[in-house]
Image (cartoon, rainbow, N blue to C red):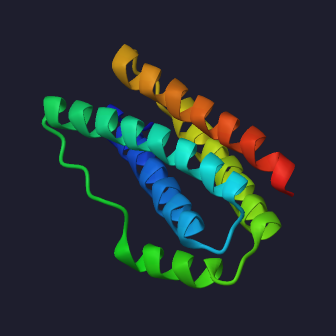
Amino acid sequence: MVTGQEFLYYQLVSVQQMQYVLTLADEADASHALKTSIREQLATLDQLESHLQILSVQRGWDIPDYDPIRKSLTALRFRQRKDSGIAEYLIRLYTDHTVAMMKHFNQWKADDSSIRNLFQKVSDCCAIGIRQMQPFL
């Protein structure tokens, strides 16, 4: 069984990883249309991260940031991608995070509306991100 703190941690790490990858995508050699979509997604994720951080502070939970080693590995995988490769990578990232968050959500049995609402917002953000990236494949 997953605790509320663990569940919030999984959501926060997922959002931070998606933010990092979107930042890499924004710095890549991509079209203006793709960069515009990426920046919209990044703004949404920034807001979600703020909400997740605030909730963790309110609860007195110490939640670490995204692992720097994973950042380095992600950066290596991301080099030299063009629009379709970037879109494909982001769709896979959103899909993987949605599946992982659903797994943790199903293991979490608490009734905490604040965490549940943030989970729904993160899930919606992933679904929107997938839809926004599909035209670039």
Q: Is residue 53 visible?
A: yes
Q: Residue furthest front?
A: 32
Q: Residue at left 82%, top 65%?
A: 84
Q: Residue at left 55%, top 42%?
A: 40
Q: Position of residue 80 (x, y in %)?
A: 69, 83
Q: How many marks?
A: 0
Which one is nearer the viewer's eye here, 21 or 1? 21
Q: Is residue 112 visible?
A: no
Q: Residue at left 61%, top 49%?
A: 36
As displayed, is residue 28 above or below residue 129? below
Q: Residue at left 53%, top 79%?
A: 75
Which one is nearer the viewer's eye here, 81 or 77? 81
Q: Position of residue 63 (x, y in %)?
A: 25, 50
Q: Position of residue 78 (x, y in %)?
A: 63, 77
Q: As drawn, is 112 to the left or to the right of 24?
A: left
Q: Position of residue 41 (x, y in %)?
A: 56, 44
Q: Quadrant of residue 77?
A: bottom right
Q: As drawn, is 68 to the left or to the right of 77?
A: left
Quadrant of the drawing holding the C terminus: bottom right
Q: As drawn, is 133 to the left or to the right of 35?
A: right
Which one is nearer the viewer's eye here, 6 or 45? 45
Quadrant of the drawing holding the N terminus: top left
Q: As drawn, is 7 to the left or to the right of 21?
A: left
As displayed, is residue 111 above or below residue 19? above
